[in-house]
Image (spheres, grey):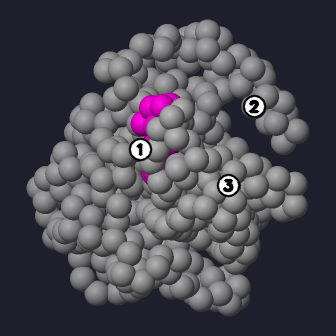
Amino acid sequence: MQESIDRRAQSLTELSLKIWGFAEAGFLEIESSKAQVAYLEQEGFHITKPMGGMPSAFMAEYGSGKPIVGYLGEFDALPRLSQKGVHIAKEPLEVGAPGHGCGHNLLGVGALGAALMVKDAIAAGTVQGTVRYYGCPAEELLAGKVFMARDGVFNDLDICFSWHPSSMNNVSTGSSSAMNSVKFNFFGRTAHAAGDPHNGRSALDAVELMNIATNYLREHVTTDVRIHYVISNGGGEPNIVPAEATVWYYVRAPKREQVEQVYQRVIACAEGAARMTDTTFEIEFISGCYNTKNNAPLEDMLYEKWQEVGAPVPTEEEKTFAKQLIESSNPEGHVATAARMKRMGIDITDKYTGDFIVPIQQNNRGVGGGGGSTDVGDVSHIVPTAQIGAATSAIGCPGHSWQITSCSASSFAQKAMLQAAKVLGLGGIEVLKNPALREAAWKTFNDEGTKYVSPLPEGLKPALDIVKH
């Protein structure tokens, strides 16, 4: 069955590199989406697009009837992380342009490859059912799957899988953070900042006072809460009292209900700032997402598939590149990662590429919060979902960095992507032919007893132009 990936290795690698070259930011992944759709149409998949009000979102389907297994793909790049591929020094291809600093050119194609593997098994009569690949935009904005989820596109799935580029080959057992992404737009009154400042009401003052209040709030939330912001509009020039100013917040916590509680306190900070400055404000809700919901039966099965497939094996040239990249740009990152892995009984002192499989972390089931977020969390609250990581970047690369952009075009990253596709493909075939596994996965899912309610305000549309602003 792994031969399905082996015979497509060249075309999948070429597709990944093509998307790396497009490097399109969230909601703008038009060419990346087109390239995947064209590939899947040639493979006989039926395409549904657009989805969730997003032009780059689509669903590709093969087979018929139940059970239905889904794969989540992403292909958005990150702003200002343009970088030459396989290059150990920071050197943008285009200054200020996006780059794949999270490896989503690999993520989408790897999940697509897994769907092709299941498609081949269905076509051969090995299994019965349906396989779907979801092209999901704007994961970095934590939005694409949330809008798709609100529209119900995942509701009839039996099982769902995803993966993420990493520096390790593993099965994800920890949880991500739930999150709200919100802009606070303040409105005041313009005036000459020197000639008649008394006539002005500064929206920027309101933004700054809100931020001060929120920074004091940090002392009075639990340590696993994260609140961070950027001032995306601070006015024009110093001689004009700003009549408009905007601050963009992410509010994160381990559980969805905790986010809602902290978010109300952040709104109170905005209200206080508006009163102090005699300004007004409006809330522009961008997106919100759930924490990931783990599923032990699926995770244990994927770990077995990782052992069956095996870790990617880097060449000496690939090892040298990874070592030079880290030693020249982030040696402390490697030291910190090595120390963490040593506590798990794994010695990577002299390793810079992940040529091993991390044992499944039984004591980390569902543990998380305080870290990053993903809109995969929303899907995991609708259908039993499991994820893996594959070693596509050098050990020690900072997240969302030019170093990862460089690694994401490398040959060892492509190897890891193909291994991830095999693991997830075997996983999909297993759940289609194993009703006991599906039953166990759903029992684990239902035991938590939570019901998915979209975090999006009613009628909210995707902020398709948000990256331009």
Q: Nearer the viewer, mark 2 or mark 3?
A: 3
Q: Which residue is mark 3?
A: 210
> Within 10 angstroms of label 2, few (less than 14), some, or many (20 or more) residues?
some
Whether 406 is drawn above or below 386: the answer is: above
User: What label sits on residue 104 in the rendered view?
Assistant: 1
* Residue contact at pointers 2 and 1, CB within 8 angstroms: no
Which residue is pictured at 79% across the width and 28% down the height? 336
Residue 21 percent location from the top left of the image = 27, 31
In the image, taking residue 57 as reference, residue 220 lies left or right, namely right
Specify the segment rendered in magenta: 231-245
* Residue contact at pointers 1 and 3, CB within 8 angstroms: no
Visible in this render: residue 370? Answer: no
Question: Mainly helix, strand or loop, the magenta region?
Answer: loop
Residue 316 percent location from the top left of the image = 53, 13
Mark 2 element type: helix
Decide which of 399, 161 is in the foreground and name it.
399
Residue furthest front in the image: 195
Whether 99 is drawn above or below 359: the answer is: above
Quadrant into which the N terminus falls: bottom left
In the image, taking residue 192 as reference, residue 300 lies left or right, namely right
Q: Nearer the viewer, mark 1 or mark 3?
A: 3
User: What label sits on residue 337 in the rendered view?
Assistant: 2
Q: Earlier in the sequence, mark 1 or mark 3?
A: 1
Decide which of 161, 431 is in the foreground and name it.
161
For badge 3, the amino acid type reads Met
For badge 1, the amino acid type reads His
How far apart marks 1 and 3 lie (CA) works out to 34 Å
